[in-house]
Amino acid sequence: MTEINGWLNIYKPYGYGSTRTVAIVKRMLKPIGAKKVGHGGTLDPLAMGILPICINKATKTVVHTVAYKKVYNFQVTFGEERATDDAEGEIINQSDKIPTLAEIESILPKFTGKIQQTPPNYSAIRVKGNRAYDLARSGKEFKLEPREVEVVWLKCNGFVRDKPNTIEFEVKCGKGFYIRSLGKDIARAVGAFGYITRLERTEVGIFTKEKSVSLEDLETAMKNREVEKLIVPIEEILKSSKQV
């Protein structure tokens, strides 16, 4: 088999970091010449969903995926605010306030278009050479400045069944956007506290959930020698980047 080059539309499972997922894929594809493997857009371990993975010569085309818009489905649980803005962090604020859907709908326009967003302290942003999450974990005080980000659209899907304090949302956004910050900001905008309890990325540009491949699917394809059928050609990436 000739050297494999291109992208895989991998669906990253819950609990797996992006680096770990890339390492698993690289190990799987090593027998067919996968020497360089990378990804186009980090996902936290507590998030699941689309993680585009580039192989060999495709690693040079990551720059073409930067402008891809992303779609996320997420849930915000109200009543508490967490240090990490997700279920992993300690509780730092509490309130009995659970917003109505009407209250939520009334503030959504504030989070659409070009907006200012302050990244979460537990993020990979560098502060004087140090990662913000390292500073946060060590208890050091610092302040991240807000930055301009883009929200193409944002919608509320209503309360989650059997979870009277949890509301589901969906958003399409641009690069550098933090869903954890959005969840916290939405809650504060209605006078409540909230944090992300479920996060799924369903789209990254041309990579969609409907056409994604699980790690199990990839393993099966390797056994059946059918991996080439799963590869997204570099040419498709170059073409799609011109249309963004």
Image (cartoon, rainbow, N blue to C red):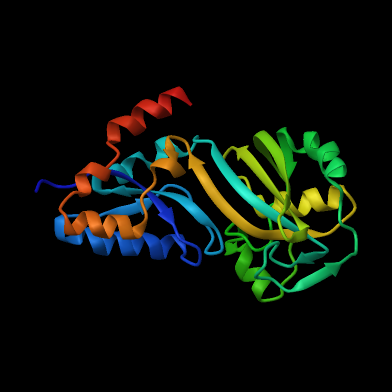
Q: Where is residue 189 in the image (x, y as percent from the top left)?
A: 85, 47
Identify the residue at image location x=83%, y=39%. 107
Residue drawn at x 18%, y 49% as measured from the top left? 226
Q: Image check: 127 left or right of 237?
A: right
- 75 sits left or right of 189 in the view: left
Quadrant of the rendered image containing residue 69: top right
Relative vertical location of residue 34 with respect to residue 170 in this rendering, above or below? below
| Quarter residue 91 falls in | bottom right
Q: Which of 65 and 143 is in front in this view?
A: 65
Whether residue 42 is visible, yes or no, is no
Residue 156 coordinates in the image, percent (x, y): 72, 42
Q: Nearer the viewer, residue 136 or 111?
A: 111
Q: Where is residue 47 in the image (x, y as percent from the top left)?
A: 55, 58
Most extreme residue toward the left is 1
Q: In the rendered image, is residue 131 in sight?
A: yes
Residue that sits furthest to the top in the current view? 243
Q: Relative to 41, is 124 above or below?
A: below
Q: How many marks?
A: 0
Q: Is residue 151 above or below residue 33?
A: above
Query: Closer to the camera, 56 or 50?
Result: 50
> Dividing the picture into quarters, in which one does residue 232 lie?
top left
Pinpoint residue 54: horizontal percent, then vertical percent. Answer: 33, 47
Which residue appears farthest toward the front when viewing the image? 162
